[in-house]
Amino acid sequence: MKLLISIAIVIFLISFILLFVFFHKENKLESEEEKSSFIMMIVMAILFSLIISIALGLFFLAIIGSTSIVNTVFSLDISLNQLIILSLAFLAYIFILDDIVEFIFEFLVGKKIIVLMILALVRIIAFYWIGLLNGLNQNVSFTLAIGVTLIIFVIESLNNMREKSKQAN
């Protein structure tokens, strides 16, 4: 639990500092009439940092929930700290590398359903290696990789069907 709180505080502080610096630089460019007060910049940075922290927290809870479900269903006996570290690594992969891989395969293949299947396979491989690098044995890592990938695949498929139904209407 302390690890989760520490991560949330670090995310909040990093986003607060970056946003405050951005607001401060942009405020210098404004005319005297339009400049915001120092307190207003702090309040804006706090509010936007909270929004960013909450959004990342919700994504993190979705990933940790997926790993937790797979851990419980298959009785993998992974500790909570290890689940948190794995979830952070999975989340980092999804936010950083997954979009690059998706862009490459969409460019090469073009068909959405084939791209989703290829992405699922690439995610299984990536999550498998992330599990191995975090000290899981091969069977546990493979099971966790397949389970989390299937959950993400189902969520993405449902999202794609929802977008198609919106476009049809």
Image (spheres, rainbow, N blue to C red):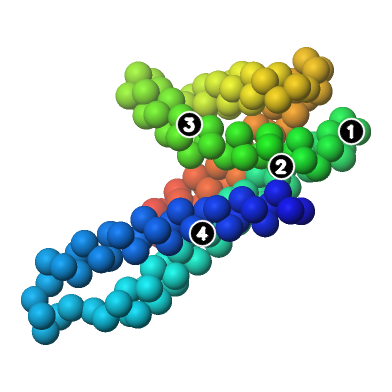
Q: CA distance from mark 4 to mark 3?
A: 24 Å
Q: Secondary structure at mark 1?
A: loop
Name which residue lies at 71% across and 19% down.
Answer: 132
The residue wearing badge 2 is 84
The residue wearing badge 1 is 77
Mark toward the viewer: 1 or 3: 1
Give whichever of discs 1 and 3 has the lower sequence position: 1
The residue type indicated by label 2 comes to Ile
Label 3 Cα neighbours within 10 Å, binned few <14 / some 14-19 / many ≥20: some
Label 2 Cα neighbours within 10 Å, binned few <14 / some 14-19 / many ≥20: many
Residue 30: x percent and y percent?
A: 12, 72
The residue type indicated by label 1 comes to Asp
The residue type indicated by label 4 comes to Phe
The residue wearing badge 4 is 12
Label 1 Cα neighbours within 10 Å, binned few <14 / some 14-19 / many ≥20: few
Picture layout, residue 84 above or below residue 167 = above
Residue 89: x percent and y percent?
A: 60, 34
For this rendering, which residue is in front, 169 or 107? 107
The residue wearing badge 3 is 98
Q: CA distance from mark 2 to mark 1?
A: 14 Å
For this rendering, which residue is in front, 152 or 85? 85
Mark toward the viewer: 4 or 3: 4
Q: Are marks 2 and 1 in contact (CB under 8 Å)?
A: no
Label 4 Cα neighbours within 10 Å, binned few <14 / some 14-19 / many ≥20: many
Q: Is residue 74 visible?
A: no
Q: Is residue 26 visible?
A: yes
Instruction: Work out which residue is located at the far bottom of the displayed protein and give it.
Output: 33
Q: CA distance from mark 1 to mark 4?
A: 31 Å
